[in-house]
Image: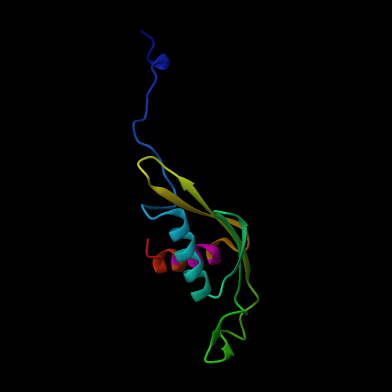
């Protein structure tokens, strides 16, 4: 018996993103609410797909720019809703362009505001 020929089968299933039992329309509505709250621009690319753009010069606090000394940061990302088993849906967020750590901070804010 050759040990190298043994196969290991993983029983666990990987799922990235945020899972919800809400309908896709309700997920998109909640996502748009949070995007507006975070001053992120978006456009519908498909029924359950949004292309998003964040710029640190867009956000306003008290009528003034959030940071006048910080360099301009542009982050482009895309959201997609996938159907899973058991009438659950997955909201996936994928970076297209922009600084990785700024993107991660932005997605952290986005996910913490979502009420799914």
**Rendering coords of residue 114 (x, y %):** 41, 65
- The prevailing secondary structure element of the residues shown in magenta is helix
**Rendering coords of residue 53 (x, y %):** 62, 67
In this rendering, the answer to whether 113 lies above or below 51 is: below
Residue 107 is inside the magenta segment: yes
Colour convention? rainbow
Location of residue 70 (image quadrant): bottom right
Residue occupying image coordinates x 49% and y 60%: 28
In this rendering, the answer to whether 56 lies above or below 94 is: below
- Which quarter of the image is occupied by the C terminus? bottom left
> Closer to the camera, 28 or 80?
28
Residue occupying image coordinates x 56% and y 85%: 60
How many marks are shown on the rendered structure?
A: 0
Residue occupying image coordinates x 54% and y 63%: 103
| The furthest residue to the top | 1
Location of residue 15 (image quadrant): top left
> Closer to the camera, 80 or 62?
80
- Which quarter of the image is occupied by the N terminus? top left
**Rendering coords of residue 73 (x, y %):** 63, 72
Residue 41 is inside the magenta segment: no
**Rendering coords of residue 76 (x, y %):** 62, 62
Numbered range of the magenta stretch: 102-108
In this rendering, the answer to whether 51 lies above or below 73 is: above
> Closer to the camera, 47 or 11?
47
Residue occupying image coordinates x 52% and y 69%: 35
In this rendering, the answer to whether 75 lies above or below 4 is: below
């Amino acid at each position: 018996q050759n040990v190298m020929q043994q196969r290991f089968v993983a029983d666990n299933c990987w799922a990235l993103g945020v899972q919800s039992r809400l309908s896709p329309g309700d997920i998109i509505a909640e996502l748009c609410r949070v995007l507006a709250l975070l001053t992120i621009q978006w456009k519908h690319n498909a029924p359950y797909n949004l292309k998003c753009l964040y710029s640190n010069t867009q956000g306003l606090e008290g009528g003034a720019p959030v940071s006048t000394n910080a360099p301009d940061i542009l982050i482009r990302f895309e959201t997609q809703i996938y159907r899973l088993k058991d009438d659950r849906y997955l909201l996936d967020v994928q970076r297209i362009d922009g600084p990785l750590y700024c993107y991660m901070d932005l997605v952290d804010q986005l996910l913490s505001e979502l009420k799914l």
